[in-house]
């Protein structure tokens, strides 16, 4: 009998995560923030502890990041091993007696960050071969020797030619540099390729901000942290074309070149808008607070800059999609890296590419959490090249299995003041149609940032003031849009998918069909779009049944869906997290469809 192969891969940085494989199958994949309750948390220690729920030994620990373990991970006192190897050793997951300085079970893939994004997208796309485009903030730290000067660069955009079982050939890479002398240094470049010695590829080495760095700079200018780019995406349609805002990119060149006077990269973390050089952008913003300030005119520069950022960055990514196809001849393109979560851009590409025969797959775990999956799958395919595991069928419900008992649920009635009653889907629809918010908790949590009916907050999309109401309950800004989950068989009647048959992972903000906006005003954004999740009974039986009950009652096959969290919090993971969230908010109802139980919290 063949021995089981256990592989645990972890992503160390922001959006840190752990992915556990058994014989190539994903056992679980989860972000640390779901367990630690700290948004974007790094260092997946709590997630590593969860490995013990499934196995007491692993064969390999595969590490993903942007810098090597030895350089940045820190050391365990006395033993001297890095903190991740040390934790795995102390837990007994790997051999306790091996040399901690060079442990044969620990594989450090931190030097190929973008390649791990590509692997996650490629293996999960279902394509036999493809070209991967990675558009990211700052990936691997790449040491360069340029004209005798030692300098560090960061990968910002990369293109890979992908083939089974584990071939990811670099064909293009944009490397960004930081520092006052960077512009002079890039005039002459002679360096060995960092991750593929002996091979060559097209390299663009500049002191410019990458595409995602431009988005991060605008996000910071608007008043948020660099990593909150989703807020900028929500704000953009409130802006307009504005001649007072300079171009964000130079028009000339073979690849995206950001306007160096406007955007200053602070690699590896973030970038800033050099507003002092542009009078329109240097307006005083000391009292900046989005809240409900829809009509504050001094914020127009923020709205219009967000508009410029969205429209111009997606144009630059489109250039790279076409470049990727031209360089490799591949018509199937997989997209990942942080910019891959831009559902506005993802839908826009479909319209631009409709007559070019190019098929795209956008990875729903495009953030750095996906590099744990990419590291696990790429390493496994390297040691088991004949494996036929199909990762395109895995979906996103990759969290832990919770087996709450009736007594567990009853205990919440005493300890948390929850009133628990039996309930049916029809009871929940009655609550929704009477303008109640209902939280929905079931099964394994979703991997990635989208709530897809297992950790969701639901509402009736037909109410005209629904967006403002739910945004206020969740403590979010007025311009933040909401998503919808629709029975797949009705999606084309309500939305234009631009040739797609479905969109189960909520990765596209799509146009609604004529006459639809007034039917579901709570989830149609100001630009007439909605981020849509198509649902079938096979994908999510309980969620589909509820939407169908809503349809049978109202004639509307779509339900208002937003992530089960409050502003600034991670999605809930456990039933305890769910009830605690209700206690901190004005949400009264929590439905557990697997148990047909409704919990009401007195707020």
Image: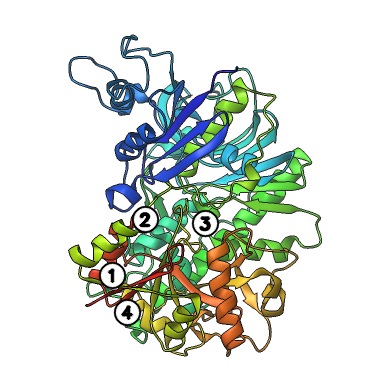
Judge from the rendering whether residue 276 lies leftward or rightward of residue 210; answer left or right. left
**SS for callout 3:** helix
Q: Is residue 192 visible?
A: yes
The residue that disc 1 covers is 582
Between the C-alphas of marks 1 and 2, the distance is: 29 Å
Which image quadrant: the N terminus? top right
Relative to 444, does residue 472 appear above or below in the rendering?
below
Of label 1 and label 2, which has the lower sequence position? 2
4 vs 2, front mark: 4
The residue that disc 3 covers is 341
The residue that disc 4 covers is 472
Where residue 226 sits: x, y (%)? 36, 55
**In front of the other: 396 or 201:** 396
Contact? badges 3 and 4 (CB < 8 Å)? no
Residue 546 badge: none
Of label 2 and label 3, which has the lower sequence position? 2
Between the C-alphas of marks 2 and 3, the distance is: 14 Å
Relative to 104, does residue 305 appear above or below in the rendering?
below
């Amino acid at each position: 009998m063949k021995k089981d192969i256990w592989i645990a891969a972890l992503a160390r940085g922001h959006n840190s995560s752990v992915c556990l494989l058994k014989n190539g199958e994903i056992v679980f994949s989860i972000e640390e923030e779901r367990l630690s309750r700290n948004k974007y948390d790094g260092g997946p220690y709590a997630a590593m502890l969860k490995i013990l729920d499934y196995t007491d030994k692993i064969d390999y620990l595969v590490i993903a990041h942007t810098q090597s373990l030895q350089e940045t991970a820190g050391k365990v006192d006395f033993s001297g091993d890095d903190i991740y190897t040390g934790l795995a050793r102390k837990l007994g997951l790997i051999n306790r007696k091996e040399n901690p300085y060079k442990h044969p079970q620990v594989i450090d893939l931190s030097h190929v960050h973008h390649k791990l994004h590509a692997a996650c997208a490629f293996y999960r796309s279902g394509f036999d071969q493809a070209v991967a485009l990675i558009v990211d903030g700052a990936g691997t730290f790449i040491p360069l020797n340029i004209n005798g000067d030692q300098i560090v660069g960061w990968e910002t955009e990369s293109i890979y030619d992908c083939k089974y079982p584990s071939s990811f050939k670099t064909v293009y890479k944009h490397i960004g540099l930081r520092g006052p002398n960077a512009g002079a240094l890039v005039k002459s470049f002679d360096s060995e390729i960092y991750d593929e010695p002996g091979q060559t590829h097209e390299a663009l080495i500049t002191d410019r901000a990458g595409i995602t760095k431009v988005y991060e700079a605008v996000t910071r200018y608007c008043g948020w942290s660099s990593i909150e780019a989703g807020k900028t995406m929500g704000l953009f349609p409130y802006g307009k074309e504005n001649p007072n805002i300079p171009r964000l990119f130079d028009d000339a060149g073979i690849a995206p070149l950001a306007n160096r006077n406007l955007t200053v990269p602070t690699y590896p973390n973030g970038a800033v808008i050099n507003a002092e050089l542009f009078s329109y952008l240097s307006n005083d913003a000391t009292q900046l607070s989005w809240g409900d300030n829809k009509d504050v005119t001094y914020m127009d520069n923020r709205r219009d800059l967000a508009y410029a950022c969205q429209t111009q960055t997606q144009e630059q990514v489109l250039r790279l999609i076409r470049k990727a196809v031209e360089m490799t001849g591949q018509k199937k393109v997989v997209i990942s890296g942080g910019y891959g979560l831009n559902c506005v851009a993802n839908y826009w590409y479909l319209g631009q590419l409709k007559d070019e025969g190019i098929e795209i797959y956008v990875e729903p775990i495009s953030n750095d959490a996906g590099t744990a999956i990419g590291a696990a799958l790429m390493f496994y395919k390297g040691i088991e090249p004949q494996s036929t595991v199909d990762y395109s069928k895995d979906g996103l419900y990759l969290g832990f299995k919770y087996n709450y008992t009736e007594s567990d649920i009853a205990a919440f009635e005493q300890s948390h003041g929850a009133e628990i009653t039996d309930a049916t889907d029809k009871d929940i629809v009655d609550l929704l149609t009477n303008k109640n918010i209902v939280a929905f908790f079931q099964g394994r949590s979703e991997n990635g940032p989208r709530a897809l009916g297992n950790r969701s907050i639901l509402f009736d999309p037909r109410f005209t003031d629904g967006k403002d109401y739910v945004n206020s309950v969740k403590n979010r800004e007025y311009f933040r849009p909401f998503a919808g989950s629709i029975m797949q068989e009705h999606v084309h009647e309500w939305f234009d998918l631009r040739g797609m048959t479905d969109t189960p992972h909520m990765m596209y903000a799509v146009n609604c069909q004529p006459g639809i906006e007034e039917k579901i005003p709570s989830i149609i954004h100001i630009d007439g779009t909605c981020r849509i999740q198509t649902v079938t009974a096979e994908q999510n039986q309980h969620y589909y049944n509820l939407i169908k009950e809503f349809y049978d009652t109202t004639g509307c096959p779509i339900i208002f869906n937003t992530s089960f969290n409050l502003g600034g919090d991670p999605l809930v993971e456990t039933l305890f997290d769910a009830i605690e969230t209700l206690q901190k908010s004005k949400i009264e109802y929590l439905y557990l469809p697997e148990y047909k139980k409704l919990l009401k919290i007195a707020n």
